[in-house]
Amino acid sequence: MKENSKVYFTDFRAKPGLNIPQKLQMLIKKAGIENIDFNNKFVAIKIHFGEPGNLAFLRPNYAKAVADVIKELGGKPFLTDANTLYVGRRKNALDHIEAAFENGFTPLSTGCQVIIADGLKGTDETLVPIDGEYVKEAKIGTAVMDADIVISLNHFKGHEATGFGGAIKNLGMGCGSRAGKMEMHYNGKPVVNESKCKKCKLCAKICAHDAISYDENTGVAIIDHDKCVGCGRCIGMCNFDAIKPNDGSANDILNKKMAEYALAVVKDRPQFHINIICDVSPNCDCHSENDAPIVPNVGMLASFDAVALDRACADLVNEQTAFMNSNLGENIKKNIIDKDNFHTNHPETNWESQIEHGEKIGLGNSKYELIRI
C-alpha cells in the first residue's frame, strides 16, 4: 500500500520577530529541501512572472526567499518561465524579460538571474520521450531541461480551463515551449490568418516537413495539413501572429496532457514544489488584469510531491468561505453552485482530472498527510 505523501503547511500569521519570507524559508527546510544535493548544481526555479497589468502574481520576495536558501545550500538558482502561445507581453524572450523586470523580478530584487526557458522566439526546446496516453514526446524549454534540479514556485489560483493552476500546471503548461503549449491546448494543426501574413517566408524555413508553401498570386503562406505534423514551430517563428492553432482540446484532455508534460519536466532528477495560496484570483495570471480574490488567503505549502501538494491546496481552498464580491460569489448568487469552490467558479472545468491522471502516470500521489508548522 502506497504511503501518504507529506505536505507541509504554514499560515500567513506573522508576529514580531518572524516575517513571511522567513516563514517560507522555515517551511521549505522543514519539508526537506536541504536533503537535495545542491552543491554547484544549476537550479531552475519555475515561476510565473505575471502578465503586466495583473497584480495577483506572486511577489518577487517569495522568489528571493527560495533563491537565498538554494544559494545557502550551494546551488546556482535562476528564475525561469517559457514563452506564451497567446499574443501578449510574454510571447518572446525580450518582451518576456522586460515584463518580468517590470513586475519586479530582477537580479537585484531576487538575487538570481532570469532565463526564458524556450529562447528568443519560443522555439528552443528539448524533446523528452514519455510515451504517455496523449503525449509521446514532450516539447520542453531547453533551459529547464538543462538544469540539474527543478523547483516549482506556484501561485495557487483558479483557472478558466483547468479549474485551478498549481504545481502541475506551472510545471506542465509553464515549461512547454510554444509548440508544446499548442500540443497541450489543441488537437488540430495550425492555420494561417491571411490578413496578418506579411509574406516574409520565415515560417517555411523552420518547417521540417516541407508543409508550407506560398500562394502564387498573393504570396500568402499555405499549410498543407497532409504534410503538417502539428509541431507548432511555425507559430513560434511568426513575428506577426499570422499562424494560429486550430481545434481546441477539451478541458479534461488539456489537464491530462498538462500532467504528462509535468512528468516530462521532473522525471529522473530532483524536484521540490511550493504553492502559495494568496490572492486567489478566479483566472490565470496570464490575464493582463486580475479579478477580486474568490476566497481568503490561506497559507504556504511545500512538498516533494506535486500531485499531493495540489490536492492538499484544493482541499484547503474548498474549506474557505467564498468572497461574495468575486466571480465565485456572483455564481453563488446566481445559484450556480457545484460541489466545490473551483467548480462553482468555472462550472465547465474539472480540476480532478489533472490530479487523477497525474497519479495514474506516476507523477505523484493524491493521498497526503498535512503537517502544520
Image (spheres, rainbow, N blue to C red):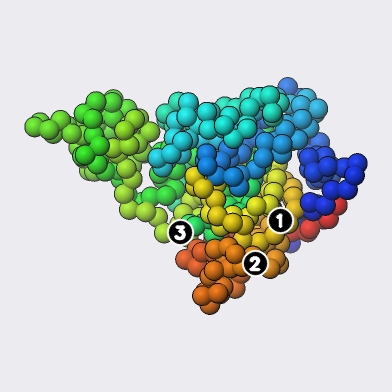
Give the amino acid at mark 2.
Ala
Left or right of 73, for residue 218: left
- Which residue is found at the position 48% from the left and 57% from the top? 161
Q: Taking the image as drawn, is residue 260 in sight? A: no
**Which residue has dot 3 on it?**
251
Give the amino acid at mark 1.
Asn
**Which residue has dot 1 on it?**
297
Give the alpha-carbon distance from disc 2 to disc 1, as whole Å.
11 Å
Q: List x then y, in percent, for residue 178.
A: 43, 37
- Which residue is found at the position 70% from the left and 41% from the top? 272
Lower sequence index among marks 2 and 1? 1
* Identity of the residue furthest to the front in this view: 325
Given residues 326 and 188, the one toward you in this image is: 326
- Which residue is found at the position 78% from the left and 32% from the top? 69
**Which residue has dot 2 on it?**
322
Q: Helix or strand or loop: what does disc 3 sit on?
A: helix
